[in-house]
Amino acid sequence: MATHPSGGDGVPLERAALDDLFSAAYEELRRLASAVRRSDHGSTRSATTLVNEAWVKLASSPRFTAVSHLHFKRIAARAMRQVLIEAARRRHATKRGGGDIQFVTLDESAFGVGAGGADEILALETALAALAQVSPRQAEMVECRFFGGLDVVETAAVLDVSEATVQRDWRAAKAWLAKELRKSR
Amino acid sequence: MDATRWERLQSLFHDAVDRPPAERARFLRAACPDDPAMVDEVLAAIAEDEQGDSLLDLGIEYAAERVTGATPERLREIGPYRLLRTIGEGGMGVVFLAERTDLGTSAAVKILRDAWLSPSRRQRFAAEQRTLARLNHPGIARLFDAGTLSDGTPWIVMEFVEGVPLTAHIQSRPFPVEARLRLFLAVCEAVQYAHRHLIVHRDLKPSNVLVTTDGAVKLLDFGIAKDIGEVRPGDAGQTIARLMTPAYAAPEQARGEAAGVQSDVYSLGVMLFELLTGVLPVAPQSRTATGVADLDVLCTTAMHPDLARRYASVEALARDVSHYLASEPLEARPDSLRYRAGKFVRRNRRPLAAAAAVIVAAVSLVAFYTLRLTDARNAALAEALRTRRIQSMMLALFNGGDAAAGPSEDLRVLTLVDRGLREAQGLTGEPRVQADMFDALGGIYQKLGNLPQAEKLLTDALDARRRLAGPASDDVAASLVALARLRVAQARFADAERLVRDALAIRRGRDAGPTPALADTTTALGEVMVEKGDYPAAIAVLEDVEAARAAEGDTPEHAASLRQLVNAYFYAGRLEDAQRVGRTTLEMTRRVHGARHPFVADDLINLGAVAHERGQYAEAEARYREALALNEGWYGAEHTRTASNLTMLGRTLVRQNRFDEGVEYLQRALAVQERVYGPVHPAVASAVNDLGSVALARKRLDDAAAAFSRMADIYRAVYAGKHYLIGIALSNLGSVAMERPDYARAESLYREAIAIFSDTQSPTHLNVGIARIKLGRALLRHGRLAEAEPELLAGMDILKTQTVPSVGWVKNAREDLVALYDRMKQPEKAAALRAQP
């Protein structure tokens, strides 16, 4: 992984805490994915998908007591993004052959989704990087809303802007990113 | 794109998006006539906004679904294993049923999914592998193989267990409560084994406990198991909290605190409840719903949220389950005195062979009756006490059970005994009863390892009895013997002998002709002589007792005096006699006490020791293991009896060059002995000796020398410089000197050892023979041929006169002599020796 999220606000996070966070993020991803496979949308489509028991427990552990609950969600969102991107990179590499590497990540046949899904996520990462160049705040907003499952109120609080601003910025950023993604297909 | 352009783009997007679709293009073209690319871009974004089906709209779960898969698709083979099908999936990995291509046997292959993700996942997987590698128990699925794929993905191969989860097994057919409990005990045993290897499972639940078709229990999934000692600061187990199955997780685990042995106890408690009731405990009140009071107590104690009130170990839980099965009082619920006393009285019809709880029961009984005495001054009851029924019953329990369950600091037991003592101290109006109580409690404190308290009580009892019953009374004789036994425990052997001889004089003065009481007191003398190391005297005394008792038949007392005779024969080197009488004793003990009594273990250990001395290590191992099963069942794993048994087993394994196995047992034993007895005690010395022997066999000479020196120091301190065991330590130090080689030092050590053996045993004792052969070799190596010859010859003569000659030593001596005669240019003598069979 290229970078690790810092605690921000001057709160450094220990390596072990990050490890826990990535592990949890990964397992959360798996949980979400399997809910989709079971077509159990109701259990996941709430605005705050990340707030399940495990996250709450992790957030209340001593390692994270120095950060506020909202701030924890912010950190978790970044961990989620990085884990997802890393998974997509691996999948993408495998699709292209990957030499003699045996892999234990992916299931080509699962749910009829090919490696295209991974490519789209990598395209999102590229577009998000471009967005961060011109509007760091909106890139963060996407991270909060999409990767972290923060709702509008929470996102506004985290970024210290009004809820109307969040709604407006999010709509524009989402539309533009979607356009970039379609271009990459 | 730059920030300005992005601002412009957004602004146009918001202005256009709420207009009617037909107007948008016109509006945009008018707004930026020179930038058709911008127009296209905004229009494309608006189209996305209207469609709302991008990845961002679908949500992260769809993104997740695209990059996480269920099973590795291309993986077909790992090493010699062909993967057949997926049999399980968890957060960590995938488990396949696999077949060994060369052998055709089944195995389970577990692969860490997405190993790249984080070091903690790899560490957890590696930890599971290490854990399994340390566990070798029929109740735990074992590790066969491990490795990594070319991309670094780790895998492990485990025993494939074909079975059903514990709960499903129970539901498959009618299961009586007893059968459920026995199955549960098997689970406890496997968990206990893991705990003994310092591993906490941390995720015990029915789906991790399979029952195979032949009814055996197998523990699976040590994926989040942990070393008991491995608690890093700040590592409060929060990751684990997330991984645990909530229903079975202990409250401290759910809070994200570090999990320990007692967390497994909790999970076992939930499982037990589920096994008994078919449902999970959901609320505190439902936890007392097994329908049986004792089982409620059991489950409640196992699942107690307060660690101080939960069973301290799986062993304690299993003991109480066993108590329940044997209709004995539970150790749990220590505050309910009347419960215990009532239970004990109800149980009284049964033979008084009880497990460790008897100590608590007996003390409670004392306290119970004492309470009633003080309260009611019931004369009839006082008289019943005077007949000493209760007291002798208590003593029988203690002598039979040696019931100091667990380490000496068993607080619950001590608390009860202390309460009994307070009650007894209040009995000033009943001085004779009080003296009896002091006598009995003194014996209990001695068993519990509180020797100063025992000494005070036994001395008080003796003084009171002298005053109340007269200096030559039976009571005084009994007190003297009790005090003598304490002196033995204090290693004050001369005092012990004097006390027993006083008691014997009283008995002889009172009883005309042989009586059981006289025989018992004489046996006590023999016992003291054995402990003191005066074996010929002990044999003479005990053979007399046996002659007087031959007609007595099977009685506990007869078996006890026979057992002492076996000890005396053994230590005197009369192995054949020891074996012969040992077998007789074993049979009698089984008839008198039943097959699972700890005395049976004692007899087995005696026979094992004889076999060991005779070089019959396989038989010795079998005897020791049989004894170990009994001792562990009776005393638990953390008891000195179990520890000395472990020492002996370890010793036999080492003699068979099974060093790693042996050292494991020996170190366990040493740890327990040091904890219970402190650093200077014969039991510690014995364990140290064996570790020294292993070090010597492995040529770790400094370790060996340190161990044997410590051993010699301990024995010198304990036995006032005069005991054959000091000689053994010196002789062993001599062997280290031979290895270095330092023949001068070896010589002086051997000479000192020979002097001690000759003095404390006899000049023709086996130990003297062996030491002289060793001395001869040291001299030979040193080139002092003329001095070596007589030592080797004398040693060989002594060994040949043994009933069972130690063939190895005779052979050694002969080889050395042949070498010696060759060097002395006496070919005819060498030839004569070579010609000998």
Image (cartoon, grey):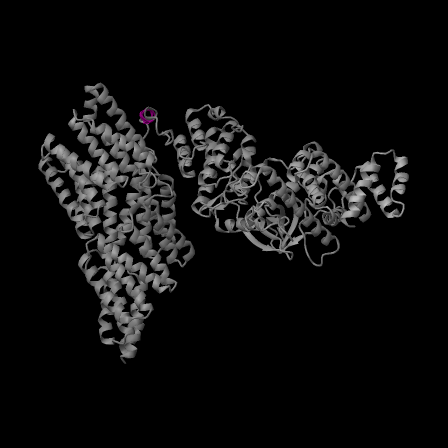
Q: Nearer the viewer, residue B424 or B276?
A: B424
**On screen, residue B114 above or below B558:** below
* Residue A174 quadrant: top right
User: Left or right: where does residue B17 sit relative to residue B497?
Assistant: right
Q: Nearer the viewer, residue B783 or B120?
A: B120
User: Left or right: where does residue B568 sit relative to residue B669?
Assistant: left
Q: Position of residue B285 (x, y in %)?
A: 48, 24
Q: Residue B430: in sight, yes or no?
A: yes
User: Left or right: where does residue B21 sit relative to residue B490?
Assistant: right
Q: Nearer the viewer, residue B336 or A162?
A: A162
The rendered magenta stretch, by its main secondary structure, is classed as helix
User: Left or right: where does residue B62 sit relative to residue B688?
Assistant: right
Q: Is residue B264 magenta?
A: no
Q: How many marks?
A: 0
**On screen, residue B819 above or below B202:** below
Q: Position of residue A147 (x, y in %)?
A: 68, 41
Q: Position of residue B694 (x, y in %)?
A: 37, 59
- State the residue at coordinates (59%, 45%): A7
In the image, which residues are magenta?
B340-347
Q: Position of residue B302 (x, y in %)?
A: 44, 33
Q: Quadrant of the C terminus of chain B?
A: bottom left
Q: Residue B353: in sight, yes or no?
A: no
Q: Nearer the viewer, residue B742 or A130?
A: A130
| Direction bottom: furthest residue | B825
Q: Is residue B341 magenta?
A: yes
**On screen, residue B315 above or below B732:** above
- State the residue at coordinates (12%, 37%): B507
